[in-house]
Amino acid sequence: MSVWKYATAGCVFALSIMVLRKMIRFYKRGIPICSTKEMRNKTVIVTGANCGIGKATALELAKKHARVIMACRNKEKANAAILDIRKMTGCGELIFKYLDLESLKSVEAFCQDIIEHEQKLHVLINNAAVMNHPYAQTEDGLEIHMSVNHFGNFLLTNRLLDLMKKSSPSRIIFVSSALHKYGKVNFEDFKGHQRKPYADSKLANVYFARELAERLQGTGVSVHTLHPGMVNTELSRHSVSPALNFIVNPIKYLLLSSAEEGSQGIVHLAVAGLGSDTGKYYNKKGQEEKWPEISSDKAMWKKMWEVSEQLTHLNKAI
């Protein structure tokens, strides 16, 4: 009996500590830890900006007077996010533009719109992603994680490079995941079931980011990759059945970082004076970390680029 008493007391104590830590985080969330440099006259694209880390990032950049293009596939959710952000700040400019990374046709149309109507693009934040989505093929015949988390980003970024070079100094930020170090890219099949769909697709995107940084040396366009850690957002909505959400959601709220906390490193990389730094890897606070060994094979970077170039028809004129 005494064992259960101590176990219960321990659980209550641990829960109390978690609640207290969450309350402290909530109190401090309005205190920025990132650079206070403003973004006046800067245009930023944030993909997946209607919720989670993307929305929190859009809010913080708007506070810094940036012109934020919210690239989302759901117009209603994007407009609702804009209304929410406007309740918290009247600064900056917020613009919705339709983008569905599942569709290469949609990516092409979005990029054409940006090229035709935007004079400058200073920051591109590749944030949108899917995780643990049920197996599906996109209209382009690609497995959905590979399409959204890598191939869509590959085409989007490359199509906008000329505008970013014209706007230099500019920067590209990849919101990655530490889970990429558990991935393995199957170069023989991007259509079927992947071994670890999320990790595999994030590793593919890391290969792209590293190769891109090499190719953009000396152009005035820098490349930065960040893992935000485990964050309580809608990204994990496919990981647990709806029936279990009522149990899991409170636990996630207590244990995981909030979207606001997860966005801090991204915002820091978007606004900080990074000088000539490029091709580096950062944690959720924007602090540099060593690249995992799996991402350091340059032959894999090149191979991923070549395959992506073929599957996205990158060399086709738009």
Image (cartoon, rainbow, N blue to C red):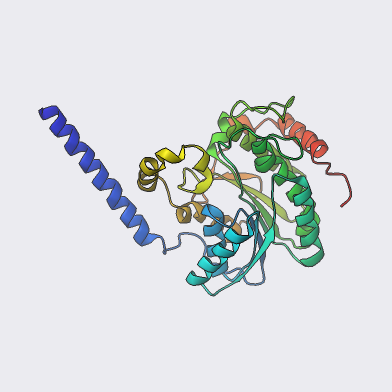
Q: Residue furthest front?
A: 243
Residue 71 point in image, percent of width and height: 66, 57
* Total numbered circles: 0
Residue 150 point in image, percent of width and height: 68, 40
Residue 286 point in image, percent of width and height: 52, 51
Q: Residue furthest right?
A: 317
Q: Would residue 97 appear left or right of 11 to someone viewing this image?
A: right
Q: Would residue 115 appear left or right of 40 to someone viewing this image?
A: right
Q: Would residue 201 appear left or right of 233 to someone viewing this image?
A: right
Say above or below: 229 vs 93.
above
Residue drawn at (50%, 43%), measured in percent from left and top? 237
Quarter residue 306 falls in? top right
Q: Residue furthest bottom?
A: 90
Quarter residue 279 falls in? top right
Say above or below: 112 vs 18.
below
Front residue of this view, candidates 280 and 85: 85
Front residue of this view, candidates 273 and 72: 72
Q: Residue furthest left?
A: 2
Looking at the rendering, in which quadrant would you find the N terminus?
top left
Front residue of this view, candidates 137 and 217: 137
Residue drawn at (79%, 41%), measured in percent from left and top? 312
- Asked if residue 260 shows in the view, the reply is yes
Residue 85 point in image, percent of width and height: 52, 67
- Asked if residue 292 shows in the view, the reply is no
Front residue of this view, candidates 258 and 272: 258
